[in-house]
Image: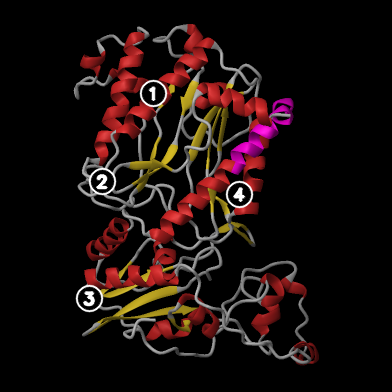
Amino acid sequence: MSDSERSLTTTEAPATPEPRATANRSTTPGSDAFKNYIASGWAERDEILPPAREQAPSALERRLALSAAFPGKRLVIAAGSRKQRSNDTDYPFRAHSAFSYLTGWASDSEPDSVLVFEPTEAGHDVTLYFRERAGRDSEEFYANPEIGEFWIGPRPSLAQVAADLGLVTAGIAEIEDVPFDDSTLVLRETGEHLPQGAGDDADADLARVLSEQRLVKDAYEIEQMRLAVAATARGFDDIIADLPRIAAHERGERAVEGVFNARARLDGNTVGYDTIAASGPHACILHWTRNDGPVVPGDLILVDAGVELDSLYTADITRTLPVSGRFTDVQRRVYEAVREAADAAFAIVRPGIRFREIHQTAMAVIARKTAEWGLLPVSAEEALEADNQQHRRYMVHGTSHHLGIDVHDCAKARREMYLDGVLEPGMVFTIEPGLYFQPDDLTVPEEYRGIGVRIEDDILVTASGAENLSIDIPRSADDVEAWIARLAR
């Protein structure tokens, strides 16, 4: 723990907020006899302090770097609140990525927590404010379905979280003592409920710096990315092993989604984003997440999926599979063109090039292939001119995005740091070219229509070049066919 961080402080829990009305809660007895009885007869809790978690040292280094970027400024980063799904049900809580990045508190973090950097002459004192567990003599313990332990299970104490994260902790009621003045910057994405500080422009500067700080991953983050990719690979194996059952169901895309989601929950926290299981012409819809169509032998199915670990780091992988186990000649032609584009883009990745060059390299292949097939009204060279770009009709998205604790990581970084940025060792991003021939596109021969192919891998920049973290997930048309032959049953 940093010497500049304040000593641990405990406080009584603030007044219990009024939970949303539920039918179950309305039947809770309110008599004094019940309250006295339910508050008695409990065994003493053992206050066991955990060792600091694996990511605690990395999180400390990140806090120190952020502190150095904002001398004299108070910084406020909230975890966020539960989001209501319907009536008295909520979506599963996930802390804001910047909050998790700075604290190391991940899938087990507490809603409505707030991290505060208080400026000092030496830098900042950092305190984590959260709603600690209530005593068993409080009504919250048994009557509050949002945070009561009778309803959601045991919750940590201030001392336990302090030991776990290597952070100073305080009760959430003490956040009222934090002055939100002109020296205060608030990460507004999750702190809408907090008072206004210096203003929107200054707050945006905090969001930008936090995004840019995450462009280069540390050793802990890189290991998490490897583990997320490995779990995702197992999920793809599960899908292929279940292809016969998937193809037999009228909503086979849902079966694909369910199989992968099961792996994500078994080996991680959840999926990193809504799984795309796009079969047949649905593969031409870039963000097809309805997943309510059949998976028909003879078609291709494009599966874009990633496992998010308990650390909240996620993979992002796409593979396009022939449902019957074999590509047709036209499917293979399109598939191998996309793979050629991906391989060409990967081949140039090394420290010192600009991020945008990856996309430009992939697009050169896409333009050449579509011109060779007679799909363009101009030559490939003419199409690549900035004022033309006809080949982009068949691939309108970008080739790469940064990846990490968010699937589209570092989104608030400046253009000169991201799209126009220079690659450095430790950066992790996707390479994901594709070709999508809409079923009603009259600019392509009929045999191409309804074919959509994307191949997406997760790439780590190394000191001398790059590593494809997902290289062990079959990529070539021949390897994909062998993969399906080996696993589908």
Residue 380: % across, % down? 26, 14
Secondary structure state at the residue bearing disc 2:
loop
For the C terminus, the image quarter is: top right
* Tally of marks: 4
Secondary structure state at the residue bearing disc 3:
loop
Residue 423 numbered tag? 2
Secondary structure state at the residue bearing disc 4:
helix
Instruction: Considering the whole magenta stretch, tell me its main secondary structure.
Output: helix
Q: Nearer the viewer, mark 4 or mark 3?
A: 4
Q: Nearer the viewer, mark 4 or mark 1?
A: 1
User: Extreme front residue here?
Assistant: 464
Secondary structure state at the residue bearing disc 1:
helix
Does residue 107 lie above or below 435 as drawn? Answer: below
Label 4, residues with CA under 10 Å away: few <14, some 14-19, many ≥20: many
| Residue found at x 62% / y 74% | 147
Pick whichever, 287 or 59, lies toward us. 59
**Which region is colored magenta?**
234-249
Q: CA distance from mark 4 to mark 2?
A: 30 Å
Does residue 114 lie above or below 260 as drawn? Answer: below
